Image (spheres, rainbow, N blue to C red):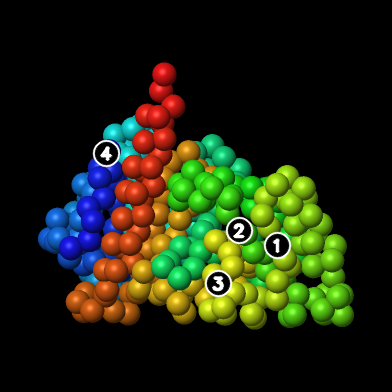
Amino acid sequence: MPEPVNAPLPLAVTIGDPAGVGPEILAHIKAREAEFGLPALRLVGPSTASFRPGQPDRASAQYALDALEQAVALVRSGECGALVTGPVAKSAIAEIDPSFVGQTEYLADACGMAREDAVMMLAGPSLKTVPMTVHCALADVPARLSQDLIVQRTRIVRHALRRDYGIENPRIAIAGLNPHAGEDGRMGREEIEVIAPAIATLRAEGIDATGPHPADTLFAPHKRGTYDVAIAMYHDQALVPIKALDFDEGVNVTLGLPIVRTSPDHGTAFDIAGKGIARPDAMIAAIRMAGEIAARRAASAQNRLP
């Protein structure tokens, strides 16, 4: 039996889209909560009896959005200690709310923050990685990258690793954008004009940042032991390695928020919903990580009291 997670308050947990695998995964977890050593959970949202597995519709998307709003309110009010979100269908929610890009961006808006300051990190047993750009077309990535974006987001990552993971001096490896990290400008100049100057700024601040590293070797086994987190330039550059290495235990963590938020690093899986074959591992990992971070933050706040 794993060591129990002793979070000071229950965690608010949404099942995501009720037509996806969220309901069956959480039903399995709730039935064996003590066995998994998890903190107390508060499932958020109305009954799912009216939804059919594998058949999402506008009502299921609205349910997911309403539950997310309720759960955020519970955490922000102090009634719950952290938020764990189930997977949603982004495009379906966007038909209801065109401003909805993803749960990370929604949480930034709900907390009154700039979306750029809510940073997605994917964390698993083998790797932690952060994409600089997330929900945008690959063709738009070069224009969205800037020195300021890389510097600001890397600062947020460093602070979170120190506060929430207890890594006093995080080693941060920053990938290039182009093949072979641009190969001295022959395959693109983003490394020379944007990424390297950002790394120089970070190093001048005392942050242990290195790169730009060629992305095709950065995630090799002998490289992963040389850093605590890898900063990638775009969505798939970050998510492909974490899903290849830690698909069943990968956790999506939102850094930079005033609240703790995690999510399993998988989607709604409408194609297998209701078949009883969805694995609970990633949701269990997300719950454990949220509880551990919440407990660490609570202990740190207690130690600061006079």
Q: Earlier in the sequence, mark 2 or mark 3?
A: 2
Which residue in the structure is indicated by mark 4? 9
- What mark, if any, has residue 8 been given in the picture? none
Picture residue at 45% right of the left edge, 77% below the top? 245
Crowding at dot 1, Cα within 10 Å, few <14 / some 14-19 / many 20+, comes out as some
Image point 49% across, 43% down: which residue? 163
Q: Earlier in the sequence, mark 3 or mark 4?
A: 4
Q: Residues within 10 Å of mark 4 (few under 14, many from 20)?
A: many
Is residue 2 left or right of 217 when viewed as pictured?
Answer: left
**Distance between mark 3 and mark 4 Cα atoms:** 34 Å
- Residue 107 seen from this side: no
Is disc 4 placed on a helix, strand or loop? loop
Whichever of labels 1 and 3 marks the residue nearer the N terminus, that label is: 1
Q: Secondary structure at mark 3?
A: helix
| Amino acid beneath label 2 | Arg
Q: Are marks 1 and 4 in contact (CB under 8 Å)?
A: no
Reading the image, the residue beneath label 1 is: 210
- Quarter of the image for residue 238 reads bottom right
Q: Secondary structure at mark 2?
A: strand
- Is label 3 in contact with label 4 (beta carbons under 8 Å)? no
- Residue type, label 1: Thr
Neighbours of disc 2 within 10 Å: few (<14), some (14-19), many (20+) = some
Up the image or down, 260 lies above or below 123; here it is: above
User: How far separated are the C-alphas under marks 1 and 3?
Assistant: 13 Å
Residue, disc 3 = 224
Residue 215 screen position, x and y as percent = 66, 76
Circles 1 and 2, Cβ within 8 Å, touching? The answer is yes
Give the residue drawn at x 72%, y 66%. Answer: 211
Residue assigned mark 2: 171
